[in-house]
Image (cartoon, grey):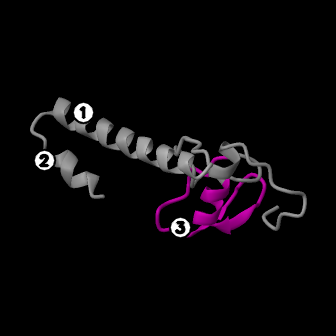
């Protein structure tokens, strides 16, 4: 779904925000309905700083740029692929606790 082009077509700022909000709320509603049919649950988590936050200690690496593909925590030394680290941060924000044998620790 190309929401970006839809949002830019609206003339006024109020119209753009209204369309922006309705598009994502509709997408969330559809996802929740589809997951509910399958007996699953959708857990919304904030995406802010997810690729800059350390999965292990929770520290924020402010020096990380988009070109950096490997996450390195300046606080605890944890190193992992940036996308994998962000996905683990999302899991932790949703309440997942890694098992004691998890290879990511």
N-terminal of the pair, mark 1 or mark 3, is: 1
As displayed, is residue 62 above or below residue 105?
A: above
The x and y percentages for residue 38 are 58, 53
Q: Residues within 10 Å of mark 2 (few under 14, many from 20)?
A: few
For label 3, the SS is loop
Residue 75 placed where, x, y %? 74, 51
User: Which residue ends up furthest to the right in the rendered image?
Assistant: 100
| Picture mark count | 3
- If you read the primary sequence from the N terminus, does the residue marked by circle 3 or circle 2 appear first? 2
- Front tag of 1 and 3: 1
User: Which residues, given as a range, are shown in magenta?
Assistant: 59-88
Residue located 62% across and 49% down the image: 40
Q: CA distance from mark 1 to mark 2?
A: 12 Å
Q: Quadrant of the C terminus?
A: bottom right
Cα separation, mark 3 vs mark 2, equals 33 Å
> Residue 62 placed where, x, y %?
57, 50
In depth, the one of 15 and 30 nearer the eye is 30
The disc at residue 9 is 2
Specify the quadrant of the image occupied by residue 103.
bottom right
Instruction: Name, please, the residue furthest toward the left.
Output: 11
Q: Position of residue 21 (x, y in %)?
A: 32, 36
Residue position for label 1: 18
Residue 1, quarter of the rendered image? bottom left
Q: Which residue is mark 3?
A: 68
| Nearer-the-camera pick, 58 or 10 | 10
**6 sits to left or right of 64:** left
Q: Is residue 99 above or below residue 27?
A: below
């Amino acid at each position: 779904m190309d929401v970006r082009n839809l949002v830019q077509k609206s003339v006024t700022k109020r119209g753009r925000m209204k369309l922006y909000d309705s598009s994502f709320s509709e997408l969330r509603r559809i996802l929740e309905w589809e997951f509910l049919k399958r007996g699953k649950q959708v857990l919304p988590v904030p995406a802010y700083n997810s690729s800059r936050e350390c999965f292990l200690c929770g520290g924020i690496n402010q020096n990380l740029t988009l070109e950096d593909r490997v996450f390195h925590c300046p606080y605890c030394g944890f190193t992992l692929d940036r996308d994998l680290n962000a996905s683990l941060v999302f899991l932790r924000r949703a309440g997942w606790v890694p098992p004691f044998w998890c290879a990511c620790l």
